[in-house]
Image: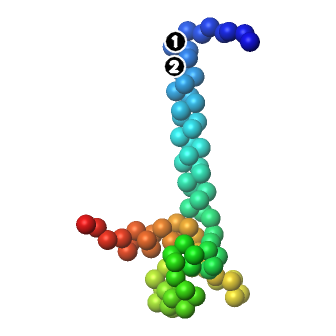
Amino acid sequence: MDIIKIETDVFEEIHKNLQDIKERLNEMKLQNIEDTWLSSKQVQRILGISQKTWQTYRDKRLIRFSQVGQKIYVKAAWLEEFLEKHSINK
């Protein structure tokens, strides 16, 4: 194993750049999650609701959704908006 010596300021710059890359990757990961489309079954499982309740939510337009033929899809960000809107503070 070889040992490489570098100056402290060079090491700190490398460390800072790695931290920046890590933060950007985390932001991209969060953005990708928010852009994810969820199926009706996934939404029901996440919310812990029945198919009938999910139908009621859609009928009342409580959660935004897209429909292609018989398939219903919800963006994860829309589901998060719904949950935030219905959160209860102390």
**Which SS class for mark 2?**
helix
Q: Is residue 21 above or below residue 27?
A: above
**Which SS class for mark 1?**
helix
Location of the C terminus (image quadrant): bottom left
Along the line of sight, the residue nearer the viewer: 45 or 73: 45
Residue 55 appears in the picture as rendered: no
Q: Are marks 2 and 1 in contact (CB under 8 Å)?
A: yes
Question: Looking at the picture, how far across and down is residue 28, in whole percent?
Answer: 59, 49
Q: Identify the residue shown where x is 55% and y is 9%.
A: 7
Question: Looking at the picture, how far across and down is residue 44, in whole percent?
Answer: 57, 79
Badge 2: residue crowd in 10 Å (few <14, some 14–19, many ≥20)? few
Location of the N terminus (image quadrant): top right
Image colouring: rainbow
Name the residue tied to disc 2: 12
Q: Identify the residue shown where x is 28% and y is 67%.
A: 89
Q: Is residue 86 above or below residue 61?
A: above
Residue 23 numbered mark, or none: none
Name the residue tied to disc 1: 8
Q: What amino acid is at disc 2? A: Glu
Residue 67: quadrant of the picture: bottom right
Along the line of sight, the residue nearer the viewer: 40 or 68: 40
Q: Is residue 65 above or below residue 52?
A: above
The Cα–Cα distance between marks 2 and 1, rounded to whole angstroms, is 6 Å
Q: Identify the residue shown where x is 63% and y is 79%.
A: 41
Q: Identify the residue shown where x is 52% and y is 66%.
A: 77
Badge 1: residue crowd in 10 Å (few <14, some 14–19, many ≥20)? few
Q: How many callouts does the rendering have? A: 2
Q: Is residue 84 above or below residue 22?
A: below
Residue 32 appears in the picture as rendered: yes
Question: Looking at the picture, how far across and down is residue 5, in whole percent?
Answer: 62, 8
Q: What amino acid is at disc 1? A: Thr
